[in-house]
């Protein structure tokens, strides 16, 4: 058994180097590959950019039969198949973009042994043509990409993913089943294992932290100006701006276009031809800035995205972390900026309330899904209002805990705060909630305590309460922060619906009786100069050379050559070689085949196609 394991290890490392151009596996990859080769099911929970595809592509090339990869988006399949073909691996995809004749040809070629890996949309799994193919082919492995889609507790549940379970059960011989996702809470992880029926799986969680990403939340009243100013400071970089509605996408796109920025857009209201053209403009760096709804980005492996701006708050932490994670896939520093306003919460509540209408879900199922969505929306809202480390908050959400309370690379950790004791304010909040008998949300409670005399509060008759105006001399923002702190500490609960009514829990007594003090961080000012200095230092230290050296000039020359080849081949530049590979070339200065093959990301096939041209450019 040990000899088999050693032989598997030797062959997998050989394929990793020869095909993909890497000398060693990253964290968790080798263990997953070994489990698959030993016939064990696996679940890999790995952050974006951690190399999930390598985990199933390497064993797929070693296993005797064919690997079926179930993937949710056409763009994801196209990207993966292009990358594999560039590496010298014949792969195919089956989805609605192909005609029935093209699908038949692809499946025929697969039966003839031409393809080792076939990507397929979940909707295609139960078509007669595909079922006939899998029943007669030697299927070694079923791989489920974006596996969180199979769970109703996941952020992107797709009923079509349940067809995977039926397919596995119908196969004459059960293959190895591997599943991968970048974001999964403990509940979603357990759901994936249970629903897919994974047999004693090796569950590999490599950690969710992306240390190269800087996270920031801005409480902005001037979002349009913030976006424009940010892009002016980052004009040479590629980035994504996410909006929650098509209208916002169109407005931001037109505004940036008017300013002369190379920008494009993407949302479901555009024709399929325009979406395809705009996506390619972004990928090929013809227009390195894209404004989009969250329909854009899944499966886009563009490695040089230097920033992701969220114009609106996403509906949940899972969505945010996945979308923000499209920045810095090459491991270089990147920034994730979220522009928050209270209106974002209202918009998301409206979208959740109307989610699932005219779908296959029963009403009781819809009610459960909406309740879960509201719960996750509240967690997202807490992220936007917490004064603690943003990175730590997200990692805790996914069940990952550390002793560090300061990452040094998020807006909260580099801000200037003072500790403010708000125990007396909290006592008044608890009293006011009791007096209102749990009938109102945070805004009404804050307005009541502050003594606001607007029409809405007068209509509720709260100006007659004893608690009305109890905190008339306190900044309403401080009262609101105290309410949020009580909710996060579960001293006060919120109803799990769009009204978010406040009610005291049994823990409130600890506050009112003086047994517990509540101290919060109160922002004095943002240390902008410190933040800029920190990020500049990180950008320089992450490069293998300083931006003002000859190596940097060489890097730009290689990048120009890559762009030229990409245009010749009609291929995205990052698929030719990543920025990280070009940096490694600048450092190692390869002058022959053997030296070029030692560069990270240069495999045999890529050397045959492009290696000599880059060697000549380096010699010049």
Image (cartoon, rainbow, N blue to C red):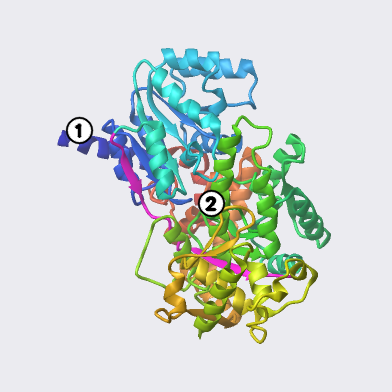
Q: Which mark is residue 106?
A: none
Residue found at the far left of this picture: 2
Where is residue 561 drawn, in percent x and y? 60, 51
Q: Quadrant of the N terminus?
A: top left
- Which residue bears the numbered disc 1? 4
Residue 396, can we see it?
Answer: yes
Per the image, label 1 sits on a secondary structure element best described as helix
Where is residue 461 drawn, in percent x and y? 73, 70
Extent of the magenta region: 200-221
Q: Nearer the viewer, mark 1 or mark 2?
A: 2
Residue 216, image quadrant = bottom right
Left or right, 521 with respect to 177, comes to right
Q: Looking at the picture, does residue 417 appear above or below residue 321?
A: below
Q: Which mark is residue 322?
A: 2
Q: CA distance from mark 1 to mark 2?
A: 37 Å
Where is residue 78 drawn, in percent x and y? 58, 35
Dot 1 and dot 2 residues touching (CB under 8 Å): no
- At x 78%, y 51%, the residue is 247
Q: Earlier in the sequence, mark 1 or mark 2?
A: 1
């Amino acid at each position: 058994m040990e000899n088999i394991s050693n032989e598997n290890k030797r062959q997998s490392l050989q394929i990793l180097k020869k095909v993909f151009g890497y000398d060693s596996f990253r964290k968790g990859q080798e263990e997953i590959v070994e489990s698959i080769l030993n016939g064990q099911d696996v679940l890999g929970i790995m952050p974006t950019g951690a190399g999930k595809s390598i985990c199933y592509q390497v064993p797929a090339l070693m296993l005797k039969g064919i690997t079926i990869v179930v993937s949710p988006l056409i763009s994801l399949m196209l990207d993966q198949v292009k990358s594999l073909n560039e590496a010298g691996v014949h792969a195919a995809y089956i989805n609605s973009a192909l005609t029935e004749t093209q699908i038949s040809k692809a499946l025929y070629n697969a039966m003839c042994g031409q393809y080792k890996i076939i990507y397929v949309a979940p909707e295609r799994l139960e078509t007669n043509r595909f079922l006939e193919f899998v029943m007669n082919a030697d299927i070694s492995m079923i791989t489920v990409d974006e596996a969180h889609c199979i769970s109703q507790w996941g952020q992107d549940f797709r009923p079509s993913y349940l067809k995977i379970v039926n397919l596995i059960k119908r196969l004459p011989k059960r293959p190895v089943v591997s599943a991968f996702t970048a974001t999964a809470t403990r509940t979603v992880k357990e759901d994936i294992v249970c629903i897919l029926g994974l047999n004693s799986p090796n569950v590999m969680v490599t950690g969710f932290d992306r240390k190269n990403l800087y996270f920031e939340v801005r409480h902005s009243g001037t979002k349009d100006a913030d976006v424009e100013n940010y892009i002016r400071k980052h004009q040479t970089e590629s980035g994504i701006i996410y909006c929650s509605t098509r209208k916002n996408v169109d407005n931001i796109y037109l505004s940036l276009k008017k300013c002369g920025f190379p920008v494009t857009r993407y949302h479901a209201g555009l024709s399929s031809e325009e979406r395809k053209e705009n996506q390619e403009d972004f990928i090929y760096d013809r227009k390195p800035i894209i404004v989009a709804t969250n329909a854009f980005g899944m499966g886009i492996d563009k490695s040089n995205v230097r920033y992701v701006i969220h114009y609106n708050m996403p509906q949940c932490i899972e969505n945010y972390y996945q979308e923000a994670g499209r920045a810095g896939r090459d491991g270089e520093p990147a920034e994730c900026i979220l522009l928050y306003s209270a209106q974002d919460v209202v918009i998301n509540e409206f979208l959740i309330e109307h989610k699932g209408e005219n779908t296959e879900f029963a009403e009781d199922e819809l009610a459960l899904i909406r309740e879960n969505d509201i719960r996750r929306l509240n967690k997202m809202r807490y992220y936007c209002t917490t004064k603690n480390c943003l990175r730590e908050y997200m990692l805790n959400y996914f069940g990952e805990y550390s002793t560090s309370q300061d990452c040094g690379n998020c807006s909260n950790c580099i801000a200037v705060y003072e500790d403010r004791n708000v125990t007396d304010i909290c006592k008044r909040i608890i009293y006011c909630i009791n007096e209102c008998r749990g009938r109102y949300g945070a805004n009404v409670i804050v307005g009541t305590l502050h003594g606001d005399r607007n029409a809405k509060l007068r209509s509720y008759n709260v100006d007659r309460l004893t608690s009305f105006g109890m905190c008339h001399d306190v900044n309403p923002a401080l009262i609101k922060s105290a309410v949020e702190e009580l909710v996060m500490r579960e001293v006060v609960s919120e109803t799990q619906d769009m009204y978010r009514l406040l009610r005291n829990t049994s823990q409130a007594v600890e506050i009112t009786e003086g047994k517990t003090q509540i101290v919060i961080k109160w922002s004095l000012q943002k240390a902008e100069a410190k933040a800029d200095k920190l990020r500049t230092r990180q950008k320089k230290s992450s490069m293998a050379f300083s931006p003002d050296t000859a190596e940097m000039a060489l890097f730009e020359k290689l990048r120009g050559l890559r762009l030229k080849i990409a245009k010749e081949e009609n291929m995205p530049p990052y698929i030719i070689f990543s920025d990280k590979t070009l940096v490694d070339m600048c450092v190692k200065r390869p002058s022959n085949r053997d030296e070029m093959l030692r560069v990270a990301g240069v495999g045999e096939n890529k050397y045959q196609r492009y290696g000599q041209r880059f060697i000549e450019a380096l010699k010049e």
